[in-house]
Amino acid sequence: MGGFNKVLTPISDLFLIEPTVFRDDRGFFMETFNRKEFHELGIQKDFVQDNHSRSKKGTLRGLHFQKKFPQAKLVRVIKGEVFDVVVDIRKESATFGKWFGVILSEENKKQFFIPEGFAHGFLALTEIVEFTYKCSDYYHPEDEGGIIWNDSDIAIDWPLKEYGINELILSDKDRKLPTVRDLQLGRFED
């Protein structure tokens, strides 16, 4: 019944998923996940955990990853709008250290498939954001890793001015995240 369109990005293995949305005068209906159809798109993950967060405008969460238990994620916004960002931290990748960002919103209904090997974060662009994601492995608090949001080697172009965000809301943990160089993940060494 559903139907999904897979949209390639400049980074290999990273995709946007556009679901078919059926609209009428009552509202809309759409499938957000269908194992068979995702397998046909080449996304063959066994998602084991769903997460749901709520954030205020200006909240920046990330950039997070798990070290020994990496997670693939399928993310989407169900209320509001975010700038969703990933950084390729696969050491052997031709795009190591490159970032890709996309606007996800309740209006565009796009989903973002993020395979293992990426640091992930998002910036809440509207007053309230509700964000959901499926994960291919369980969360292991002792395995957490992260990269500071403003790492100059990565140089993410966060749309702060465009959305009137003058001050970010960050967790204490996210304020103290290291740079890619500090993590010694690879290619940024002098």
Image (cartoon, rainbow, N blue to C red):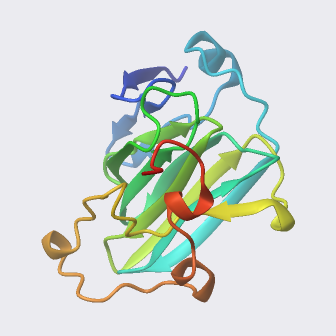
88 or 161: nearer the eye?
88
Q: Is residue 177 above or below residue 51?
A: below
Furthest residue in direction left, as rendered: 162
The residue depicted at 43 percent of the width and 22 percent of the height is 6
Q: Quadrant of the N terminus?
A: top right
Residue 113 horizontal/vertical position (percent): 53, 36
Left or right of 145 on screen, residue 171: left
Residue 24 horizontal/vertical position (percent): 34, 40
**From this viewpoint, is residue 45 visible?**
yes
Left or right of 112 on screen, residue 37: right
Q: Is residue 168 above or below residue 29?
A: below
Furthest residue in direction top, as rendered: 40
Left or right of 154 on screen, residue 115: right
> Could you tell me how many numbered marks the image carries?
0
Residue 63 horizontal/vertical position (percent): 53, 62
Furthest residue in direction front, as rendered: 190
**From this viewpoint, is residue 19 visible?**
no
Residue 26 horizontal/vertical position (percent): 39, 49
Left or right of 49 on screen, residue 190: left
The residue depicted at 37 percent of the width and 24 percent of the height is 7
140 or 3: nearer the eye?
140
The residue depicted at 70 percent of the width and 21 percent of the height is 44
The residue depicted at 59 percent of the width and 14 percent of the height is 42
Q: Is residue 177 above or below residue 119?
A: below
Q: Is residue 20 above or below residue 180?
A: above
